[in-house]
Image (cartoon, rainbow, N blue to C red):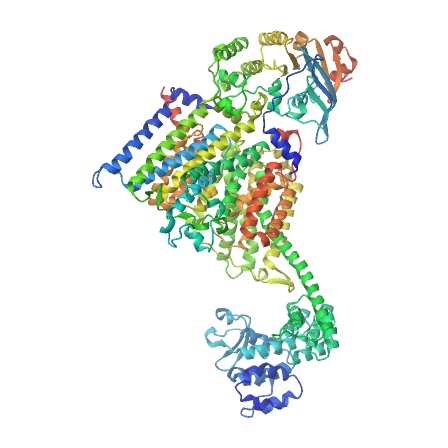
Amino acid sequence: MSMTSIGRLLSRGHYSAPPPLDLSHNIVLYLEGISVSFDGFKALNNLNLYIEAGELRCIIGPNGAGKTTMMDVITGKTRPDTGSAWFGQTIDLLALSEPEIAQAGIGRKFQKPTVFPNHTVFENLELALAGERSVWKVLFAKLSPSQIARIDQVLETVGLKDHRSTQAGSLSHGQKQWLEIGMMLVQEPKLMLVDEPVAGMTPQETEKTAELLVSLAGERSVVVVEHDMDFVRSIARTVTVLHEGSVLAEGSIDKVQNDPKVVEVYLGE
Amino acid sequence: MNELPKMKNQTAKIFCGLLLALSAICANAQDAAEDAAPATVLPTTYEAMVAALPEASYDDKELLLQKISQSGNPQAPNLLHALLDGRLMATEAGKVYISQSSDEALAAKNLSDAITGAAVTGVNAESISPIGTNNRLRKGLRALCAQLDLASADADARSKAVQSIMRDLDEAGTAALRARLPLEKESSIQKSISSALALADLQSADANIRLAAVETLSGDISSEVYNGLTTLITKNDDGSFTEPDLRVRTAAAEGIRKIETRRKAYGALETLFFGLSLGSVLVLAAIGLAITFGVMGVINMAHGELIMLGAYTTYVMQLLMPQHIALSLFLSVPAAFLVSGLVGVGIERGIVRFLHGRPLETLLATFGLSLVLQQLVRSVFSPLNRSVASPEFMSGSLVINDAFSVTYNRLYIVFFMLIVFAALQLILKRTSLGLKVRAVSQNRAMARAMGVRTEWIDAATFGLGSGIAGVAGVALSQLTNVGPNLGQAYIIDSFMVVVFGGVGSLWGTLISGMSLGVVNKLLEPWAGAVMAKILVLVFLIVFIQKRPRGLFPQKGRSVEN
Amino acid sequence: MIIKTLSERFFATDRGSSIFFSLLLLVTVLVPTLNLATGEGSFLHIPNYSVALIGKYMCYAMLAIAVDLIWGYCGILSLGHTAFFALGGYAMGMYLMRQIGTRGVYADPILPDFMVFLNWKELPWFWHGMDHFWLAAIMIVLAPGLLAYVFGWFAFRSRVTGVYLSIITQALTYALLLAFFRNEMGFGGNNGLTDFKDILGFDLQAQSTRVALFIATAVALGLAYFTSRYVVRSRLGRVIEAVRDAESRTRFIGYKVESYKLWVWTFSAVLAGIAGALYVPQVGIINPGEFAPINSIEVVVWVAVGGRGTLYGAALGAVLVNYAKTYFTAALPEVWLYALGALFIGVTLFLPQGIVGLISQLARRRA
């Protein structure tokens, strides 16, 4: 083992609090020249993407366009072969691990809802709640009244108030989606990555989700990956189209939908 | 030579016995021998000489044997060898037979007539007993045999004869070798004859001859040469060198250095071979696991017990056909494959399939099964170890030279492992079963959609891996005792080999098993056997933590998730 | 996932723990009283060997709780936990060995018998100071704790999980087994450490000392249970269960999974070490056999039988399986391994939540 790798191991052992998010240039996320390949298959190919502070951005693209891989890169799950990823002006995402990125202020909702099935809804939110993450402090942590109030408030927002003590595993698919959104809310991230939030939701729920996401943007930035074009139309100001691992088109929904390249990709000639 | 008759009655006669026996080959010795036995008149025809052997005194036997060896009779070498090995039998009536076995129980089974060489049957085992020899006689016999063998048509026999003479070098032997040298066509034998002669020349009074001899011997790694050269540079008690000539000593020292270098090289080669054979055992033990764990992802802690079952199958086969050890061993391979394979299918159908996707539970359940299998074997056979006999072609060793020899059982294990490996590769790469196995391991749902009966394939794959474990058991039965704990000893090693090589890669398993075997044997000389094993284990623990996917990892996003 | 709902519904106020503490208190008071205060003839009398046996079971229960913490709550199947148990035992054994002094066969004031026998001239460095109980006590915690910390630090950071981790924990204890068999290690080789005379100046053969050890073990078990219960009911407990159920999700909400695993792993190893240290003076010997991988796997079965994911389940399993083992190995020795093997298979196939799960299920059916 070389000295540098020992050093790296050691440094990973400490909680080096990431610097505070610097939004002085009004850009919350920079992805520049990102490439990822799996066994020769290029999942991302020189991807460049910028998200403004407070923006609500929709990302669309056919299957295999690299949407999920992009989220994996931002959240630290996958390391790109080349490129750079910055959160604000000062935080280098490629130097951080998944929990560090989460602590820095990036929240993620997965495509397939993943909650903690053996915990109650309340406990799920308690775990996600912004705050202490170090082992010893968590061992002795107690919820303050204001924290409990915050959780109850989110429960109200996501409509799970009546399921406060229900095992998360026994929720319906749609309820799990809401719970996961709730978990992301209590985490209070500066940037939310939301992967297919309305899959499995009723039209009413979909509408409610759209409202929620729109209301969330502004204070924080929201990136939504979604297939449902009606949903995208209902919330989007700016849409980015991914294709074969790089950006094919970007702009307002009308502009993008009339882009011949996009039409070709989606409809094939 | 004329002193011989006088010496005959002296108590020191034992010490000159060899000289006597060997000197008989010289033309003038014959007269001496005749003089030596005035009391009894020895027979002269081959038949009569053979018939006289059982009753003759040791001294007379010596004379008779010399004559027999000179008789030129085609049966003579056989007879001398038989007597040397204690296989020359006599009845009370004085009839002499050559047996194939010195074992009393078997001696009567394969007899041939000592005079004609024709096979003889129907001799009562009680009525025959081996013709006795003593040390002195055997020593003489060895020399006689060696000299006869020098003329043998069989190169192997000649080579052995040269070695035998070289071990107890004397004038008669030297003379025989000198006579043989110009006739010898085989270059390797020529070379060893020259070495032997040079070794004899070391005793020469002429320093130049000694020097030439040393130069001939330089680099020859046989122990006789090494000892011969070492004598030259040792000091006498008074501090003077045994070898007076400085040139000879320098050359001898140089020769010894060369020998030592070569010995070291051969020693390294031998370590490498030991490592490869240990590696082969590891690969054999692990390769079935590479299928069940690597291809199916099922962790089978009873894998070691499947190996054990294979070993016990060999034991049972041998009990069934005690007369045909070699045949029973060959038949054990398919038998063990079937036994362990069927048990494996049973495990898959009975336990593993209910625990699909729950590896830790599978691990526990199969571990429980391993306990049951061990206890079952204890109840059925015995808690004690059973030893399985090795057929003749597996015993002994292939001697390449004095510094390097390989035992046949270890050598065959390497080949056996390669055959098993190749067969497994063929099954997986060339048969439709293999195609389906690979399909199911890569994408179960898709394979099912294409009409593959995944249930059936699971059972067959598990059966294949288990059957291979059984085959490994056959091989192990030839190396160690067969006991209920046989499998336990291999389970951790096997997992380590598979994980080190990279799960799902048969080639990885081969390379990792071989390299772990070699590393283990390389460490042994300076760390000791147990410590070497600990070091390898610790290395593997650290390695898996650094590279959890092994040496040859499978890649792709599906693996990452 | 059912265990928690059901057990919480059934033991609404964590009745399992209440039962556990009541039983433990009862045993702690009753067993010594009935052993010391009643005569041998009395039908209430508890013989000395039963005291030792129950003391042993309590050590096992502690070990089972340790394994349950790491397996039942955190989802890490350790097949090498008796390594920590044995290390704690060896630390205690070294202290007891040094107490023998001149009463050994060779009567060497410093060197234990086996060292004299091996012709060693002086104490190896790691034996120095082990005649002080306080140092031994520190080593009982430190030796298993440190090994667990270093091992876990490497393993969890490189994200070795699942069966791979199980196999390397097994390899770890196997390597230790081989190492402790060697005389050169300085731990008595094959024979281990034995022939202890006294502890803290009290004669180990005296029944009063044995009862004191019994009570100490009961107290330690109670404390271990109490602490473990605090841990699993704290937010940290909820985090490690989250790690068990959805490891990467836990990462994405900002928890350093490795650190949590490492904490529980080390805590569990220390518990196991303390259990081992209490075990040794009661059975009177510690040898390398304690490192045997099969022992570790047996512990896992105790936990599985009792019901993993509940602390009282683990303790219950340890006592039940060991009682069965004591009974079978005396009455029907051949049957024991069949029974144990069948237990492994039966529990994993038919009783995934163990006896506690079964009880909750029955209770629910009745309700």
Image label count? 0
- State which quadrant residue A71 falls in: top right
Looking at the rendering, in which quadrant would you find the C terminus of chain C? top left
Q: Nearer the viewer, residue B109 or A207?
A: A207
- Seen in the picture, residue B478 relative to C197 is either above or below; the reply is below
Residue C239 makes an appearance in the image: yes
Q: Which residue is drawn at 29% across and 43% down?
A: C206
- Seen in the picture, residue C54 relative to B478 is either above or below; the reply is above
Q: Locate residue B464, reporting x and y percent.
A: 57, 43
Residue B151 makes an appearance in the image: no
In-image side of A212 versus C30 (left or right)? right
Q: Which of C27 and C129 is in front in this view?
A: C129
Q: Nearer the viewer, residue B195 or B121?
A: B195
- Seen in the picture, residue B269 relative to B354 is either above or below; the reply is below
Q: Nearer the viewer, residue B394 or C356?
A: C356
- Seen in the picture, residue A62 relative to C60 is either above or below; the reply is above
In-image side of B438 versus C240 (left or right)? right
Q: Locate residue C354, reporting x and y percent.
A: 42, 30
Q: Locate residue B286, reporting x and y percent.
A: 58, 45
In-image side of B385 versus B498 (left or right)? left
Q: Residue at x 72, y 68 (%)?
A: B218
Q: Locate residue A59, reporting x and y percent.
A: 69, 15
